[in-house]
Image (cartoon, grey):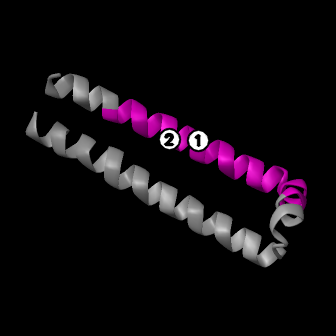
């Protein structure tokens, strides 16, 4: 696998991961109440706690995409 192929791979990984993040955000905002009710039945969780968990998880996911996809992509682009 050469550098150009690896760059393309990392870029597509970042695009797919950001697509997942956007879908997650849209589902979280548009179906918030039904999603909370579903999880509240299983875990007895308050709305504030539910929002905090999702916000933290989205932030963690975004940082993971940045560190594992975009930083290596830009490093390889600088080297190539």
Q: Quadrant of residue 14?
A: top left
Query: SS at mark 2?
Result: helix
Provide the residue designation for mark 2: 17
Image coordinates for residue 26, horizontal then vertical, percent: 73, 48
Q: Is residue 27 left or right of residue 37?
A: left
Whether residue 9 is situated above or below residue 25 in the rendered picture: above
Whether residue 69 is situated above or below residue 43 in the rendered picture: above
Q: Is residue 34 left or right of residue 12?
A: right
Q: Are marks 1 and 2 in contact (CB under 8 Å)?
A: yes
Image coordinates for residue 56, horizontal then vertical, percent: 58, 68
Residue name at image x 84 percent, y 62 percent: 42
Provide the residue designation for mark 1: 20
Residue 24 among magenta residues: yes
Whether residue 20 is situated above or below residue 29 in the rendered picture: above
Mark 1 packing: few (<14 Cα in 10 Å), some, or many (20+)?
few
Q: Is residue 63 left or right of residue 43?
A: left
Residue name at image x 18 percent, y 46 percent: 75
């Amino acid at each position: 696998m050469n550098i150009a192929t690896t760059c393309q791979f990392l870029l597509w990984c970042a695009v797919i991961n950001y697509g997942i993040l956007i879908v997650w955000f849209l589902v979280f905002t548009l179906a918030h109440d039904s999603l909370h009710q579903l999880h509240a039945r299983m875990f007895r969780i308050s709305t504030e706690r539910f929002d905090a968990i999702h916000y933290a998880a989205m932030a963690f996911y975004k940082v993971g995409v940045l560190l594992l996809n975009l930083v290596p992509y830009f490093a390889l682009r600088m080297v190539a």
